[in-house]
Amino acid sequence: MSVRKYNNFDLHFIFDLKNEKIHFLNAEYVHPLKQELVQELQQDFQKDSNVKTVIVFGSGVEFRCSSYSDLDLCIERYDCDRTFHYEAGSPNEAVDLLYADRVGERLRREIEEKGIVVYDREGEYV
């Protein structure tokens, strides 16, 4: 099951970029506290040819994000049997990784409505 990504920008705040090194897709919609981690993860997304699209949702795209918040990622894969492994971040940075083909209906709706695409291998959501 694929998640439809709407990028409902009208529902989101536009944040300042944390620094000049931040340059991933839709970075201005990710909270500054999570921008560096998402930037680091870009290399892991690019290295894994199974990663089709990555969506940030939850507190990472809202003002309520804090240094204690985890980063919620939903990954759309080509091969649903292969898992994603990443090297980015430090041990104290929590990443909650979900796969689009395994999320329930309620969470799927939240991701569709509030999620922001931060990686798009095929350029479908640019």
Image (cartoon, rainbow, N blue to C red):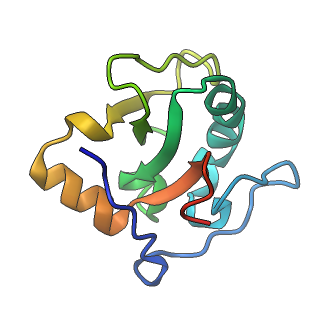
- Residue located at (40% from left, 16% from top): 82
Relative horizontal placement of residue 124, taking residue 76 as reference (left or right) = right
Relative horizontal placement of residue 54, taking residue 105 as reference (left or right) = right
- Residue located at (70% from left, 41% from top): 39
Relative to 69, residue 64 above or below = below
Residue 70 at least partly seen: no
Which one is in front, 11 or 68?
11
Q: Position of residue 70 (x, y in %)?
A: 42, 37
Quarter of the image with the N terminus is top left
- Residue located at (42% from left, 38% from top): 75
Relative horizontal placement of residue 47, taking residue 83 as reference (left or right) = right
Furthest toward the right, the residue is 20
Q: Position of residue 65 (x, y in %)?
A: 45, 53
Furthest toward the bottom, the residue is 10
Relative to 28, residue 95 above or below = above
Which one is in front, 71 or 8?
8
Relative to 69, residue 116 above or below = below
- Residue located at (40% from left, 25% from top): 79
Residue 30 falls in which quadrant of the image? bottom right
Residue 42 at least partly seen: yes
Q: Position of residue 95 (x, y in %)?
A: 45, 30
